[in-house]
Image (cartoon, rainbow, N blue to C red):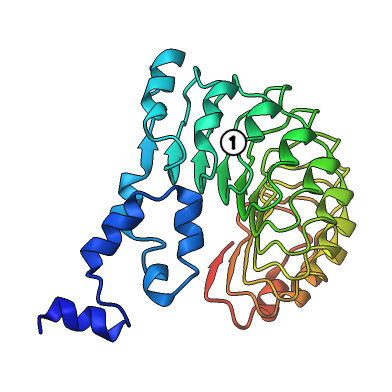
Amino acid sequence: MSNREASSEASGSWIPVEVLRKIISFCHTREWIQLSYTCQQFNAFKYDRELMSNKQRTLKKYLSSQEITLAFQKSQNTLFNVNLNQNLNVEDVHFVFFKGIYLLNMSQCSNVTDNAFSYLRGVQILDMSACRQTEITNQAFSHLTGIKKLNMRKCNQRTITDEAFSYLKGVKVLNMSDCTQYQITDKAFSYLTGVEKLSIGGCAQPSITDHAFYYLRGIQELSMWRCNQTTITDKAFSYLSGIQVLNMWRCNQSTITDNAFTYLTGIRKLDASRCNQHTITDRTLSYLVGIQELNM
């Protein structure tokens, strides 16, 4: 018996790995993911690099709208990972090719509206950073209810409000840094109770207060750099007792004092550099007994 046959027999199947990989290569992305849950052997192919490379597409920025259509027509419904970064000619009509997709980068695609998101139901990872057009509203997010990782950095248009976050209750990783609109308040955070990693850097609007942090009690990693509003005080940190990584670079408000750090006894990594307020002193270090990486 050959080593290949022995490996197949040990896994409960006589089908060689190469044959299984060939079979799965013809599956649509959604079928591929569903198949991975049927048995251990198929599950091993869920993130198979060779298969993923065949289902990835990176679009050149200078393609015309018609060229984009031709590029995706042959691979419709078989794509896993698509990179449209900075392609200004991508329009809503092209998103019909992305049904069932797992990962999409549409950063700085400025001709997209809410309609495009209707084809992204089931997407797990989405980068829509710097998509600042007012044609993207809360309605776009209603199609992202199953998403796990979302980058919406610099999506600071007023058409995105607290309501958008009501559709993101299952998100685990969220970057909403530089979302400076006053339409985002503490209420948005009430929908993010399951988030594990969050960036709100540059969100310095006073509509975000201590109460927002009440909903982040299970968070592991938080980036709040340059959040200088005085509506964030020591009380906010009382809700972060389980946090492991915290970035509060240039948080210069005097409402944050040494007392804030009494709640961070389990923290492993802290960046408090350029926090120039006199309310933070050497006393802070006495509370950081388990710290492994410190930048002050």
- Residue displayed at 77% across by 48% down: 167
Q: Residues within 10 Å of mark 1 (few under 14, many from 20)?
A: many
Q: Position of residue 186 (x, y in %)?
A: 87, 50
Q: Quadrant of the C terminus?
A: bottom right
108 or 281, which lies in front? 108
Q: Is residue 267 above or below residue 171?
A: below
Tell me which corner region of the image, top left, top right, bottom left or bottom right, holds residue 246.
bottom right
Is residue 230 among the parts visible in the rendering? no
Image-quadrant location for residue 62: top left
- Quadrant location of residue 5? bottom left
Q: Which residue is mark 1?
A: 129
The residue positioned 66% from the left and 75% from the top of the image is 285
Q: Secondary structure at mark 1?
A: loop
Q: Is residue 269 above or below residue 229?
A: below
Q: Residue at x 86, y 36 (%)?
A: 183
Q: Is residue 209 left or right of residue 16?
A: right
* 24 to the left or right of 17: right
The answer, for residue 150, to whether it is visible in the render is yes
Indicate left or right for 42 with 20 as reference.
right
Q: Residue at x 48, y 58 (%)?
A: 33
Give the quarter of the figure containing the N terminus: bottom left
- Identified by mark 1, the residue type is Ser
Is 68 positioned to the left or the right of 268 in the image? left
Q: Nearer the viewer, residue 170 or 233?
A: 170
Q: Position of residue 54 (x, y in %)?
A: 31, 46
